[in-house]
Amino acid sequence: MLRIVVSGANGRMGRALTALLTDTVDAQLVGATENPDSDYIGLDVGELAGVGKLGLDVVGTLEAAPKRIDVVIDFSSISSTLVNAEWCAKLGVPIVIGTTGLNESDLKRIELVSKKIPICMASNFSIGVNLIYRLVEIATVALKNDDVDIEVFEAHHKRKLDAPSGTALSLGQVIANSRGQELDEVADFNRKSQFEKRSPQSIGFSSIRGGDIVGNHTVFFAGEGELVEITHRASSRMAFARGALRASRWLIQQPPGIYDMEHVLEFS
């Protein structure tokens, strides 16, 4: 039985993971954490997730969680994720990280931690999204000698803070790598007040925030006389939760290092 602690228990992904784990045979939710200042500390995590009382209260730190832990799944905040990863390193507990928006300094801290424990990081744990990463790579390589303009579009719920999404940026990185480019040199995030032609090698990004959109991503390959679209639409966060659980099962068998969903799915 895989013993899991979920960090960020009252977030959308935290609640989805709680619901998933209550109905999973080979894995068990043994702990749930939230920000120590949160009003949810001390509440039953099952009631927060809408699956009924589980007899498991939300705590403020991993130190306050049960001591017998096989893996931590973290969908919290940047500051909490870094603290959690360093705590996991001290105890030798693998961690799955779904928090996005980490900067270069944050990633260096994660890299240091990965010398002691295995870490799986992904901007999106959906199996479908990780499949379109591969499809986008194939399309980019196939069309690299054609006069094709590439645009990345994403849409999410109105409460999502980062834009473009981590998944959109990952798609952009796949495209840039396939073209031999540096993403920060070719990414176009803002066309406001621009009165000039589109750069032929640029990668455009556009975002929508509204309602309760779970997550839509499309990459457009716009050529003369034809348009290729590669799209993924998520209708439920359960797709992400199942992917994170699959990553957890895989990660506990790995040596220290940083991994992603390509490794989990044996794409690389």
Image (cartoon, helix red, strand yellow):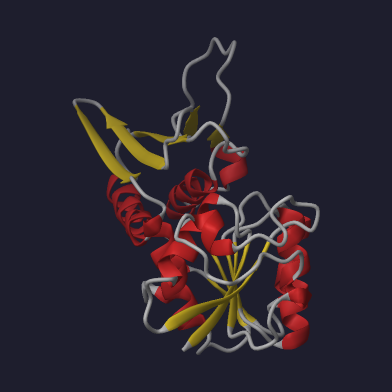
Residue 259 lies, with reference to residue 133, above or below; the image says below
Residue 112 in view of the camera: no
Coordinates of residue 209 in the picture (x, y in percent): 50, 29
Q: Is residue 93 left or right of residue 218?
A: right
Query: Please, which residue is most extreme toward the left here?
Result: 225
Coordinates of residue 91 in the picture (x, y in percent): 74, 86
Residue 87 in view of the camera: yes
Residue 48 vs residue 25, the one in the foreground: 48
Q: Report which quarter residue 114 is drawn in.
A: bottom right
Coordinates of residue 107 in the picture (x, y in percent): 71, 62
Q: How many numbered marks have been drawn onto this rendered protein structure?
A: 0
Q: Is residue 159 left or right of residue 144?
A: right
Residue drawn at the location 56% of the way across and 55% of the way down: 48
**Quadrant into which the C terminus falls:** bottom left
Residue 123 vs residue 223, the one in the foreground: 123
Residue drawn at the location 37% of the way across and 54% of the way down: 129
Residue drawn at the location 27% of the way across and 30% of the way down: 223
Coordinates of residue 62 in the picture (x, y in percent): 73, 73
Residue 131 lies, with reference to residue 193, above or below; the image says below
